[in-house]
Amino acid sequence: MTSTLNHLLYSLSLSMNLREVLKKYGKDVGLHIKAVRSYSQQLFLALKLLKRCNILHADIKPDNILVQCSHSFKIRSIQFID
C-alpha cells in the first residue's frame, strides 16, 4: 500500500495545474483550441458524473485542476479537500 501511495503522489507531482499550464503554454497567445476543447469536454463530463453522485464541488478553479503534461491534453484530477 505504501509503495502504491508513493507512486500516486509521485505521479501527481509530475502534473501541472491549469493555471501553470496557461502561464507556461498560453502566455500572450492562449491555448490551442484543441486543448481548450479537450479540457472543456473532460470538465463537463466530470461535472456530470459529480452531479449524478450528488456531489457538489464548491471550489472549481484553474489551481485545483491538474493537467497531465503531454501531447494528449488530459486532465489528471480535480482536487477535493475535506
Image (cartoon, rainbow, N blue to C red):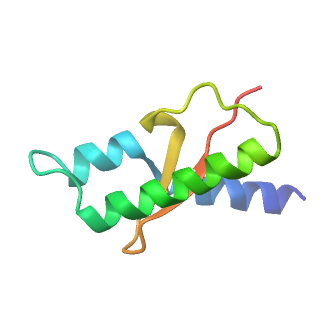
Give the image quarter of residue 59: top right
**In the image, 77: left or right of 35?**
right
Q: How many marks?
A: 0
Q: Residue at x 55, y 51 (%)?
A: 44
Residue 19 in picture, x, y percent from top left? 36, 40
**In the image, 43: left or right of 18?**
right
Closer to us: 10 or 19: 19
> Residue at the left extreme?
28
Give the image quarter of residue 82: top right
Residue 43 in picture, x, y percent from top left? 53, 51
> Residue at the bottom extreme?
71
Residue 29 in picture, x, y percent from top left? 11, 51
Closer to us: 15 or 37: 37
**Image height of 1 relative to 81, above or below:** below
Q: Residue at x 40, y 70 (%)?
A: 70
**Image height of 11 relative to 52, above or below:** below
